[in-house]
Amino acid sequence: MFLKKVENIELLDPFPRMTFSDAMSNYGTDCPDLRYNMKLQDMKPFSDKSDFNSFKSAKLWWESSYRMVRNIPVKLLMISLIL
């Protein structure tokens, strides 16, 4: 492995690789931006125990369509996604 310098940025060669499945389950996209290390987190354990009505009313829909509740950890803010 050697380093190249492009626009004052050192690049690894070869680039790190991941499978399509890992990219989709960890980042929600097939071309993740790895600079910020913002992996999606599974919220199912939290949503199953929560009294929040949105989680309760959508629980059957999520389970019947094999969807997962995920969120992106952001400082002072949690953005929830349904994937």
Image (tube, helix red, strand yellow):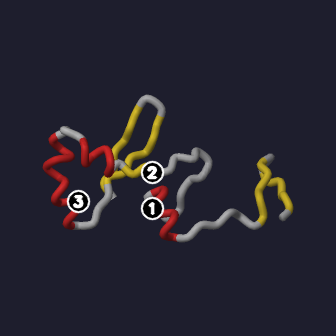
Quadrant into which the N terminus falls: bottom right
Disc 3 from disc 2: Cα separation: 17 Å
User: Which mark is first along the chain, 2 or 3?
Assistant: 2
Q: Is residue 18 above or below residue 10?
A: below
Q: Tag 2's secondary structure?
A: loop
Image-quadrant location for residue 79: top left
Q: Residues within 10 Å of mark 3 (few under 14, many from 20)?
A: some
User: Which mark is first along the chain, 3 or 1?
Assistant: 1
Q: Give the numbered dot on residue 40.
A: 2
Q: Residues within 10 Å of mark 2 (few under 14, many from 20)?
A: some
Q: Amino acid at mark 3?
A: Trp
Residue located at (18% from left, 44% from top): 54
Residue 69 percent across, percent down from the top left: 32, 53
Asked if residue 32 lies left or right of residue 59, the reply is right
Residue 75 percent across, percent down from the top left: 48, 32
Q: Is residue 41 above or below residue 75?
A: below
Q: Amino acid at mark 2?
A: Leu
Residue 55 percent across, percent down from the top left: 21, 46
CB within 8 Å, label 2 to label 1 = yes
Q: Amino acid at mark 1?
A: Ser
CB within 8 Å, label 3 to label 2 = no
Q: Which residue is mark 3?
A: 62
Q: Tag 1's secondary structure?
A: helix
Disc 1 from disc 3: Cα separation: 16 Å
Farthest residue in the right direction?
2
Image-quadrant location for residue 25: bottom left
Q: Which residue is mark 1?
A: 25
Q: Tag 3's secondary structure?
A: helix
